[in-house]
Image: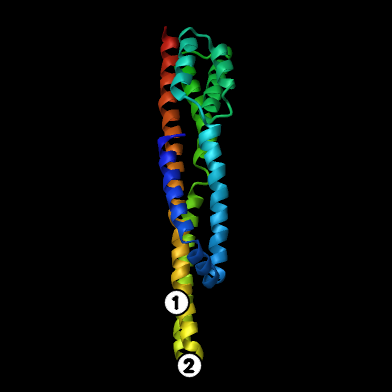
Amino acid sequence: MSRGFRILFLVVLLFSVSSLSAAVNVVEMFVQGGVFMYFISFLLIVMLIMAIIKYWQLTIKEKLDTKKFYLKLKGYIKNNQTEEAIRISSQFKKTTIGFIFWNGLLGYNDGLKSGKKGMELQRHLQNSFDEAGLQAIPNVEAGLFWFDIIAQVSTLLGLLGTIFGLVASFDALANAPEADKSRLLTEGISMAMGTTAYGLMVAIPTMLIKGALQARADKIINDIDEYSVKTINQITYAMKD
């Protein structure tokens, strides 16, 4: 597990412990918050499901030491053993960088077999890697924008609950019988404060999780850019030799 994810889970753990320490207040806050709490809770469940899916995709599915992978291919490329490099790449084609290398090398090999040479073969090689990248790279960051939307909507729902709670409080002061004013005013204020707090309790972890996932996605894309260029250059040098 990367350092960023360890820090993230530590923060979320501390956040959860602090919430559990005031469990009674949280339950009361949820009950008094009304229907807005259910909407925010739905967003929380959606966020957690998405976080698990993206964590699996970016950390477990994409678990590949890119540098070692490149160095392994480099030896075969220097010796013009393209078929062997393709075979190695095919073993990792479920990862994004493995898929790109596999398709790029396949395209290069097809160019060799079709008799392309020189600049024409170099352009064909570059196009093969670019085409594979355009196909695979968008999947790395796919869905991450939803975390921003969930964080924003949960905060806005909390603020909307605050407005409704304040309206209920003012209505109680203006129209409720004297015997009920204190109770209704307290309920309205509790709803106002509770929905805002709950919205933020969902939004803050959502933003932290999104930041950690985005950092992992950026690392994958940067590795793809770096080692794709190195591989293309290595193949070009081998062609000149």
The image shows residue 9, relative to residue 62, as above or below, that is below
The image shows residue 23, relative to residue 167, as above or below, that is above
| Image location (x, y in percent) of residue 138 | 51, 39
What residue is shown at x 43% (from left), y 50% (from top)?
A: 14
| Image location (x, y in percent) of residue 169 | 46, 82
| Image location (x, y in percent) of residue 121 | 49, 17
As helix, strand or loop, the secondary structure at mark 2 comes to: helix
Q: Which of 136 and 134 is in front in this view?
A: 136
As helix, strand or loop, the secondary structure at mark 1 comes to: helix
Q: Which amino acid does label 2 sit on?
A: Glu
Q: In which quarter of the image is the C terminus?
A: top left
Q: In this view, does 143 lie to the left or right of 2?
A: right
Q: What residue type is labelled 1?
A: Ile
Q: Which circle marks residue 189 in the picture?
A: 1
Which residue bears the numbered disc 2?
Answer: 178
Q: Can residue 145 be seen in this view?
A: yes
Rendering colour mode:
rainbow
